Image (cartoon, rainbow, N blue to C red):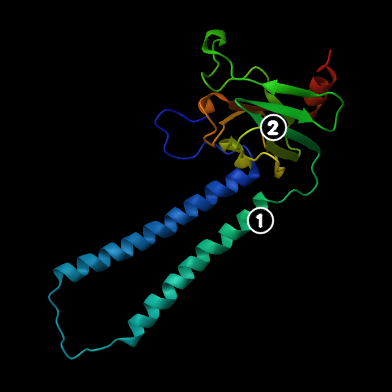
């Protein structure tokens, strides 16, 4: 969950999100170094009074300021491409969950089990219990086993939605007539909240996502008790 006055990302709950935060910090470090050098150069140009009218060219400095930015871009591009391919990789999923975006709620189908499907609506403010989060709590959370790879199949029934859970590093568009896929693995138990991140209509702000990660034994018990 985000905290009041928070300026950084939410705490990572998956390995992909952890790497995204690390790359963000890496990029900020490079950006800080570049801005420091540029600011120092501008300040030096403004305050010094050295003049040499016989220097008409400087191949060395031109070589440096051509090669150095290329190396900096390479330092940023290589880890970025690596994470890009990692986010799109679904190797050996242990469970598959299909989610369908509607106006304005989510449907979940556990395709590995018989008749395990549900609709997930936002809990009205009047029905909230102590400790529940307003506009984020739902009546049926999506339950997944922790430390196992989960494959998400995402689509929509009407307009474009976006299934987004920041703590898991997941953001996938739900497009009518198209089935998008993504995988994630939760590293710890907990409840992770998200919201539709595509402007989908009047109640766009009222279709939250709640993912509950539990251990495998509790998950199988939840599945077995689902239809009872």
Q: Secondary structure at mark 2?
A: strand
In which quadrant of the rendered view does residue 103 lie? top right
Q: Work out which residue is located at the far left of the displayed protein and give it.
A: 49
Farthest-out residue, bottom: 54
**Tag 2 residue:** 100
Left or right: residue 141 versus residue 38 is: right
Structural distance between the alpha carbons of marks 1 and 2: 25 Å
Whichever of callouts 1 and 2 sits on the residue coming sooner in the sequence is 1
Q: Quadrant of the C terminus?
A: top right
Where does label 1 land, which residue? 85
Discs 1, 2 touching: Cβ within 8 Å:
no
Secondary structure at numbered mark 1:
helix
Q: Residues within 10 Å of mark 2 (few under 14, many from 20)?
A: many
Q: Is residue 55 above or below residue 8?
A: below
Q: Residues within 10 Å of mark 1 (few under 14, many from 20)?
A: few
Circle 1 or circle 2, nearest the eye = 2
Q: Nearer the viewer, residue 70 or 136?
A: 136
Visible residue check, residue 213: no
In the displayed structure image, the side of residue 91 where residue 156 appears, left or right: left
**Which percent across, then down, holds residue 14?**
64, 40
**Residue 92 in the image, given as x and y percentages of width and height:** 80, 46
| Rendered residue at 15%/72% (across/down) | 48
Q: Position of residue 40 (x, y in %)?
A: 26, 65
């Amino acid at each position: 969950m985000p905290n009041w006055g928070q300026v950084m990302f939410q705490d990572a709950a998956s390995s992909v999100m952890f790497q995204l935060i690390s790359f963000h910090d890496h990029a900020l470090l490079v950006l800080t170094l570049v801005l420091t050098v540029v600011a120092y150069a501008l300040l030096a140009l403004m305050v010094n009074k050295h003049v040499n009218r016989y220097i008409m060219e400087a191949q060395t400095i031109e070589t440096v300021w051509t090669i150095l930015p290329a190396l900096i871009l390479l330092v940023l591009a290589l880890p970025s491409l690596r994470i890009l391919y990692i986010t799109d990789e679904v190797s050996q999923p242990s469970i598959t969950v299909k989610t369908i975006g509607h106006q304005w709620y989510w449907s979940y189908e556990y395709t590995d089990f018989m008749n395990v499907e549900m609709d997930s609506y936002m809990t009205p403010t009047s029905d909230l219990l102590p400790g529940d989060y307003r506009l984020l709590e739902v009546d049926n959370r999506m339950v997944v086993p922790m430390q196992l790879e989960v494959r998400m199949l995402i689509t929509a029934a009407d307009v474009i939605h976006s299934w987004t859970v920041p703590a898991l590093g997941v953001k996938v568009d739900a497009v009518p007539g198209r089935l998008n896929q993504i995988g994630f693995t939760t590293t710890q138990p907990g409840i992770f909240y998200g919201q539709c991140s595509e402007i989908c209509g009047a109640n766009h702000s009222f279709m939250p996502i709640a993912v509950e990660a539990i251990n495998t034994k509790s998950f199988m018990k939840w599945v077995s008790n689902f239809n009872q």
